[in-house]
Image: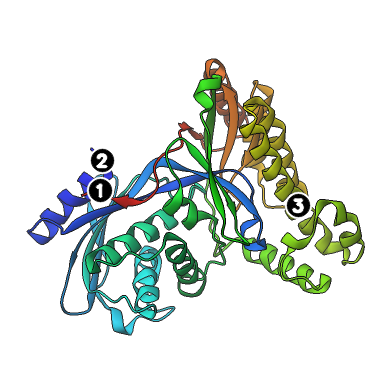
Amino acid sequence: MSQAARAAGAFERLHGRAPAGVWSAPGRVNLIGEHTDYNGGFVLPFALPHRTAVAASPRSDDVLTVSTLHDNDRAETADPVQIASLEPGSVSGWAAYPSGVAWILREQGFSQGADLVVAGNVPAGAGLSSSHSLECATALALLGLLGASPSRSDIAKWIQHAENDYVGAPTGLLDQTASLCCTESHVLFLDVRSGESDQVPFDAARHELEVLVIDTRASHSHTESGYGDRRRGCERAAELLGLSSLREVELSGLDAALSALPEELRPLVRHVVTENNRVLETVALLRADKYAGIGPQLSASHASLRDDYRVSCDELDVAAESAESAGALGARMVGGGFGGSAIALVHADGRAEVEAAVTAAFAARSFTAPRMFTAVPSAGAGQDR
């Protein structure tokens, strides 16, 4: 059963009527381009088939009710809130995400009381953007009830505002833009500074390759991890260099920039500048139909995230290293780091061997057994019914 059908069915059970509509949004994998989005750089995500669906109907009393389905289809309902009274900090826990969306849409002039029922299968805590898929689906649902259709880029910026200022997570624009704007069978080449984007065809299967997602089960949280420290460090480096963002540092000028900075900021800048270049190299390889060539770019990205940006962890390193030892063409952590998932570019006929090697490596270190699946570029957010 699809997540949209689950959400619609639960809505009828909880509210005694069919929803006015159902909207859904996917999780995402970022092929390459990590921690570059809030530095005005380049990213290259694609949408997962895993989705969060929101069944919704309007209310006339400015009240927002939200229920979410657990894996056993048991519904958990948050306390109803008055949209007019929503302020940062007024709602905590999982309900802060849809409430934050209602808050920011109210600030933009789109206020709509509503009953919402949520169902999803994006793994939580896996660095695959489960929270943003919930926020994007909620935004489209609330806007859809009003018959409003702002640009997807505006919606992404509003959701970022809600995530930063309402939920308290200092995230960039990558996740919500990917969930809203990705298309099937493509990666989204996004220049965050300009807002320009291009859908680059991505058909790994044609090359007998697969992108294997390795959910390490090491849970992460942007609000509790060192994510914010890294972001503040990048902002401080840009300020010391007299720049609006680190995007302005070209690869050719990296050494000069590093020499002008205190030692503790240099690794952050080195990662951002070289990662932007790796995105450009990866796009060029895909356009030249040299898919196997992106493997070394993925591995170099992981090394940079591990050694310079220092956002990896033992589970992520073991996932990447064991996958490569078993024949993966390249592997790297994805997402904010400190846990979550890695990806590996593998030969389709060698996937089972890679999976077995990763599982064995985790068991040898007494880590929780990882979850693995092949990621296929899928459709972005939209209305299901």
Image side of residue 60 versus residue 189, left or right: left
Task: Name which quarter of the figure residue 227 lies in.
Answer: bottom right
Mark 2 → mark 1, Cα distance in angstroms: 10 Å
Q: Nearer the viewer, mark 2 or mark 1?
A: 1
Q: Describe the element under mark 2 as helix, strand or loop.
A: loop
Q: Earlier in the sequence, mark 3 or mark 2?
A: 2
Q: Are marks 2 and 1 in contact (CB under 8 Å)?
A: yes
Q: Position of residue 6 (x, y in %)?
A: 21, 46
Pick whichever, 11 or 243, lies toward us: 243
Amino acid type, callout 2: Ser
Mark 1, residue position? 384
Check disc 1: other Cα within 10 Å, few if <14, some if 14-19, many if 20+: some
What secondary structure is marked by label 3? helix
In the rendered structure, which amino acid carries the disc numbered 1? Asp
Name the residue beneath numbered marker 3.
271
For the view shown, which residue lies furthest in the top direction?
349
The three-letter code of the residue at mark 3 reads His
Percent of width and height locating residue 294? 67, 32
Q: Quadrant of residue 361?
A: top right
Asked if residue 29 can be seen in this view, the reply is yes
Residue placed furthest toward the left: 16
Name the residue rendered at 45%, 69% in the picture.
Answer: 158
Q: Earlier in the sequence, mark 1 or mark 3?
A: 3
Taking depth in this image into account, of 3 and 111 the one nearest to the observer is 111
C-alpha span from label 1 to label 3:
40 Å
Q: Residues within 10 Å of mark 3 (few under 14, many from 20)?
A: many
First-in-chain label (2 vs 1): 2
Residue 224 to residue 178: above or below: below
Q: Say which residue label 2 marks.
A: 2
Q: At which x and y percent is residue 64?
A: 25, 72
